[in-house]
Amino acid sequence: MLFTHDTEVALAFAVALVNTDSDVDALTDVAALDHLVSSWNWTGSRTHDEAELREVQQLRPRLRKIWESDKDGVAAIANDLLAEFHALPQLVKHDEWDYHLHASPSAAPLAARMAVEAAMAFVDVVRADELDRLRICGNFDCSDVLVDLSRNRSKRYCDLSCSNLASVRAYRSRTAGAS
Ligand SMILES: [Zn+2]
Ligand SMILES: [Zn+2]
């Protein structure tokens, strides 16, 4: 494993959150937020209102900037999020999980916890000097972000459908060249 489990989960969630805001916004109401929160097993306090939704929506462009920044930029964004949302790293164990880091209390607002968890994960990426694993999808008409956690650094597409589309295009351009 490249990073600790909690860091890899946090990176995967940051990707999922940023990618709700691609061609179509997939996070436009509280029901969509509820779905995102439950499918990623977020616990802790919720207000289930428009203000909470807006805070989570507004976090997305700030996180997307991480994919568009160099190392100094990523470090600055992570530091800003940690300071703004009052991160306080603590080792905790709960449920079936052994010690891992929580950096904001479960009573903190949802967007604050999401911001701090993502920032802590990107701190690990910067410290490990693995920024080149943060990529934009290689399919030219897709702007989704991805984190390549593969051993051989081979992940180029956000998902299987973009990967399939790219191979169909490559095939067509080969056959077009041959005729
Ligand atoms: Zn936990
Ligand atoms: Zn894609």
Image (cartoon, rainbow, N blue to C red):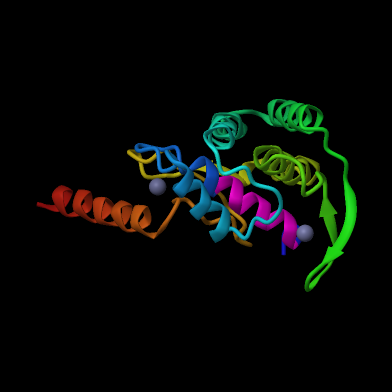
Name the outermost residue toward the left. Answer: 179
- Report whether 38 appears left or right of 95: left
Instruction: Farthest residue to the right: give it.
Output: 91
Q: Residue 17, image x and y in percent?
A: 54, 44
Q: Is 114 located above or below residue 179 in the figure? A: above
Taking the image as shown, residue 59 lies to the left or right of residue 82, namely left
- Residue 72 in percent (x, y) is at 73, 26
**Front in this rendered view, residue 174 or 100:** 100
The segment highlighted magenta reads 5-15
Which residue: 60% across, 34% down? 63
Identify the image quadrant of the N terminus: bottom right
Residue under the point 37% across and 56% down: 163
Q: Closer to the camera, 143 or 163?
A: 143
Magenta: predominant secondary structure element?
helix
Residue 113, x across and y down, in percent: 72, 43
Q: Quadrant of residue 175?
A: bottom left
Asked if residue 13 is among those painted magenta in the image, a careful observer would answer yes
